[in-house]
Image: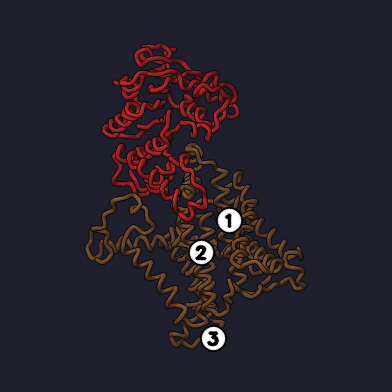
Amino acid sequence: MSGAREAGPVILAVGGISLAFGGVKALSEVGFDVREHEVRAIIGPNGAGKSSMLNVINGVYRPQQGRITYLGETREEMEPHFAASHGIARTFQSLALFKGMSVLDNLLAGRNLLMRTNLLLQALRIGPALREEVAHRRRVEEIIDFLEIQHVRKTPVGRLPYGLQKRVDLGRALAAEPRVLLLDEPMAGMNVEEKQDMCRFILDVNDEFGTTIVLIEHDMGVVMDISDRVVVLDYGRKIGDGTPDEVRSNQAVIDAYLGVQH
Amino acid sequence: MFYRETGQYKTTYEADQQLFPILQDRLFVIAVLAFAFAVVPLVASEYLLRAILVPFLILSLAAIGLNILVGYCGQVSLGTGGFMAVGAYAAYNLAVRIPDLNLLVVFVLAGLAATLVGILFGLPSLRIKGFYLAVATLAAQFFLDWAFARIKWFTHDSSSGSVSAPPLAIFGWLVDSPAEKYLLVLGFVCVFALAARNLVRGAIGRSWMAMRDMDVAAEVIGIRPLYAKVTAFAVSSFFVGLAGALWAFVYLGAWEPLAFDVNRSFQLLFMVIIGGLGSILGSFLGAAFIVILPLALNQLPGWLGIPMSTALISHIEFMVFGSLIVFFLVVEPHGLARLWAVGKEKLRLWPFPH
């Protein structure tokens, strides 16, 4: 389904990542790469370490071992601010929106890194501060149009239904104009129509802006449809990596999902 | 029927992002300001100005400061009284030690002194949250109380520990009568309330609210927790310190450290909670509730012509006041500002049901 854009060179690679919380090993020796402009899916049963992997990529978790290569630069761990300021944005599995703020403010907060005026100018709201607010509002309105959430732009996010909140979460990530977008179960808990909408948004983002997408998803139909390559994790280990067709016929993957007869 | 935004089309983002996008709101605010600046000083009695309006305005300013910290950034503070004291004593020392300094400069520098102290005591907020932070700021309160009572340098070696402010003169204008004091305070409050409103609806305000609502997500989108929290403490302390300086110089005139004890901190926290966390208007409503209501309750039996002893009145005042606080918090946990917003929402439709 995708593939309107050719995948480019490797933009992000992780290697030998091991992460443990006390005695619990969340990830052991996991490594894979992500090419620019591709849709890369991470799948696996519950507790396989998928979300932990995303948290390692954007620096929320610091792995005990391993290295992360992003934009040609290798480091042992990522730092959230570095990740954000160098074009890595993400959405969250359990919604992590700013509930007390309006949709507009949530999206504008996503662009906070791009705002430069100092506190004094903001307090007076004159000159550069005012121009900046308006300029960023314009960009945010484009995203609001794109996601079709115009009618709720001034509603506090906490009052929106779940499906719309998921869209706002995506919008907040998009507002930062990322190069790499990490999506943690963007379709969890949605009905078929909402899933279709979300798929369309993700593919459009990938298509129109060339954004690289790393996606965690449980709906196999969706994963097989929209991703270019798939990584399979199970109990913190990588058990499969390849195109959807390759992964589908991988015996280890089938065993992990269906169980093995003893 | 009259409060409608129908027909008021916005064609630019500037128009949509202005302070009061609805025409009726703008007119209302202009009318209130005109009334406050032009009519009140002429008609209000000396008692009303001196004992009600001036403290109400100054405490509103302090409540705005605290609201920035607690309501917008989500960092609880019980040290507000202490930070007010920093402003008050900084202003005192500046005015006494550098007599030629313009009073406006003194007030601003006093605010900045409180900012520095606020940043210092705000740094632990990076590590501790919620109740634990409240306890840490309570420690700040007690430390500052102690410092101003015991370190003689702050009180200019005054033997009793109490100090008095020099006469208020700004550019040759001697601020002396209650009406003049009221106008001075009103000017400060208007300017800084506007500044606060601009900050909370700008980029910095969004980063404060983002820290409040979901700190992990805020960090992931590139908001630095250190910067967001420290600026919130800094701006908040500036407002509180400025209010402290005004409280000491304009309202009290002469004071001792007890004027800024922990009760003041609690009083301001109540104002912010009752008025509405995360609302500039709420800071005013909360301050009005806490300052004016007890006085009104106290006067009520007299107005109604009910004979009652002063002691009984003051007991009843406490009881009614306490139950009103509970009542309002039960009816609207989000504060008076939310009641106001709900009322406006209703008014938009009135007299039609939908």
Q: Quadrant of the N terminus of chain B?
A: bottom left
Q: In x, y percent, where is residue A25? A: 55, 24
Any part of residue B316 in sight:
no
Question: In this rendering, is residue B176 above or below A128?
Answer: below
Q: Which chain is brown?
A: B
Mark linked to residue B117: none
Q: Quadrant of the C terminus of chain B?
A: bottom left
Q: Do the residues labelled 2 and 3 touch (CB within 8 Å)?
A: no
Q: Which of A256 and B33 is in front in this view?
A: B33
What residue is shown with label 3?
B309
Residues flagged by tags 2 and 3 on a common chain: yes
Any part of residue B13 in sight:
yes
Question: In this rendering, is residue B223 above or below B251?
Answer: above
Q: Chain A takes which shade in the image?
A: red
- Tell me if B230 is positioned left or right of A50 in this view: right
Foreground tag (3 vs 1): 1
* Amino acid at the residue labelled 2: Met
Q: In the structure shown, which secondary structural element does the residue marked by tag 1 occupy?
A: loop
- First in sequence: mark 1 or mark 2? 1
**Residue depicted at x 55% and y 60%:** B239
* Amino acid at the residue labelled 1: Ser
